[in-house]
Image (cartoon, rainbow, N blue to C red):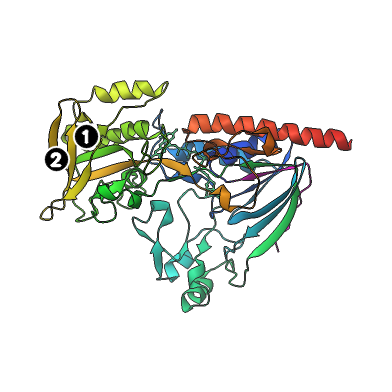
């Protein structure tokens, strides 16, 4: 049974992405007791699924490593993975929270040797790679996963596969009797760092994501470009595994549109500019990136990246909202149809691959959770004094880049610390 000590001087952080890790670490390093919960088996959130990140084009592993070092050296921070909040009652300085802990079926003995994965054959869609490939039913979510501990997929529990995994483990780390647990804790403040999810491209019917294999999303493209990803870093077309060299990007795919997402996620333009550099990195002058856009929104210092990409002769900008995507059945090429709004010419242009720059929406539908918190029109958490001791951090509050998400998380941590200081002052 998991043992957790928490009081009204404890801060609960929900979500272990870059924002949640930041908020939790800032508070713990100020001497506060913090519980950080993450619904997935490991920390890192969506940043861990990027190949590189702008503006410096470094690998996410680098920032992750720094945070992990801070986490490992802090005794005030308790991390619970595979954990979600099911209810919150109470008020500022005194919240009662119910947590649901799902079983990993692997205990602390695990050395991440991989013997369990070698022993099993059943495979499921790999969530880390947005389902672009399969993973084993005993698995490490990704190379740098923290904790470095395997997971047994609950879908094989009770089957011969699970027994094979258990028998293969040399350190007795697999416990198939683990059960779902419910924990009730008291905390003084709550930071919601539950982040974002990509808008569901299946809903954008004219773009054919659900029926044209060579139409993918920007988050899938990140995984494809990563040498540790499903294609070993090659830009391969899903239909025939041929290399895609002439690639179109559609900006505002399902964004700034009253039929889909009304808001602008602000990040998608810069993400596409970054992704054109992946094409150059792979093919040099032989690759072609074609960006269909309404207007490019590269804010602040991201403008430098925009200016740099504009100088690249392999990148073409076409001012147009693409009307539809059809498919050339003989080649598998997606064909973009629309009107170029600069010259008002109609086009029907085939490409090897199309990447939809989908928007970012809140990962949690807070209207479905039994908590009282103010949301904006897009479902992100608003800053509101009525929220009491509950604060949003990072993309739970808006679509933000990593830099802004981290700054926002630090500010939220400070607000939560102020709540705890008041509680401590009142009790002294
Ligand atoms: C295509 C694309 C490329 C991008 N590239 C860049 C880039 O190069 N540079 C850059 O600065 N930004 C980039 N971004 C933006 C970047 O991804 C975000 O800034 C970053 O992910 C924000 O981190 P976060 O922790 O707020 O949210 P997330 O990364 O979404 O983390 C949230 C965490 O909370 C967990 N969680 C969710 N719900 C619950 C729950 N109910 N209970 C417990 N845990 C929960 C999730 O599992 C996750 O681990 C890109 C965005 C897109 C769309």
Quarter of the N terminus within the rendering: bottom right
SS for tag 1? strand
**Mark 1, mark 2: which one is toward the viewer?**
2
Q: Main secondary structure of the magenta part?
A: loop
SS for tag 2? strand
Q: Is residue 237 left or right of residue 196?
A: left
Quarter of the C terminus within the rendering: top right
Residue 188 in magenta?
A: no
Q: Earlier in the sequence, mark 1 or mark 2?
A: 1
Q: Which residue is mark 2?
A: 349
Q: Which residue is mark 1?
A: 290
Residue 377, x across and y down, in percent:
51, 39
- Stretch of the chain drawn in magenta: 1-14
Residue 187, x across and y down, in percent:
74, 46
Q: Are marks 1 and 2 in contact (CB under 8 Å)?
A: yes
Vertically, is 411 above or below 125?
above
């Amino acid at each position: 049974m998991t043992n957790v000590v928490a009081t009204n001087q404890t801060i609960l952080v929900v979500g272990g992405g870059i924002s949640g890790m930041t908020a939790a670490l800032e508070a713990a390093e100020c001497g506060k007791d913090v519980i950080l919960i993450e619904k997935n088996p490991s920390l890192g959130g969506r940043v861990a699924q990027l190949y590189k990140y702008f503006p410096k084009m470094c690998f996410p592993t680098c920032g992750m490593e720094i945070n992990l070092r801070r986490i490992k050296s802090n005794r005030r921070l308790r991390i619970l993975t595979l954990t979600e909040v099911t209810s919150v009652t109470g008020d500022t300085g005194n919240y009662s929270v119910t947590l649901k802990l799902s079983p990993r079926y692997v205990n602390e003995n695990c050395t991440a040797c991989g013997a369990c994965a070698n022993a099993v054959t059943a495979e499921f869609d790999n969530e880390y790679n947005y389902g672009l490939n399969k993973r084993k039913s005993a698995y490490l979510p990704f190379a740098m996963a923290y904790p470095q501990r395997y997971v047994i997929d609950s879908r094989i529990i009770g089957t011969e596969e699970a027994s094979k995994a258990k028998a293969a483990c040399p350190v007795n780390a697999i416990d198939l009797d683990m059960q779902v647990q419910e924990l009730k804790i008291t905390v003084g403040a709550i930071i919601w760092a539950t982040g974002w999810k990509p808008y569901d491209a299946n809903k954008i019917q004219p773009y054919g994501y659900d029926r044209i294999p060579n139409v993918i999303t920007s988050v899938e493209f990140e995984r494809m470009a990563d040498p540790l990803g499903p294609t070993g870093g090659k830009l391969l077309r899903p239909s025939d595994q041929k290399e895609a060299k002439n690639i179109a990007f559609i900006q505002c795919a399902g964004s700034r549109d009253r039929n889909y997402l009304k808001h602008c996620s602000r990040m998608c333009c810069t993400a596409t500019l970054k992704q054109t550099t992946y094409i150059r990195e792979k093919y040099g002058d032989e690759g072609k990136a074609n960006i269909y856009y309404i207007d490019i929104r590269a804010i602040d210092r991201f403008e430098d990246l925009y200016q740099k990409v504009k100088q690249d002769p392999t990148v073409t900008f076409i001012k147009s909202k693409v009307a539809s995507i059809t498919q050339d059945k003989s080649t598998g090429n997606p064909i973009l149809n629309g009107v170029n709004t600069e010259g008002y010419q109609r086009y029907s242009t085939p490409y090897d691959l199309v990447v939809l720059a989908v928007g970012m929406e809140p990962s949690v539908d807070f209207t479905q959770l039994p908590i009282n918190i103010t949301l904006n029109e897009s479902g992100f958490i608003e800053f509101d004094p009525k929220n009491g001791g509950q604060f949003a951090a990072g993309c739970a509050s808006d679509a933000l880049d990593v830099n802004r998400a981290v700054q926002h998380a630090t500010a939220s941590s400070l607000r939560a610390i102020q709540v705890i200081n008041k509680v401590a002052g009142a009790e002294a």
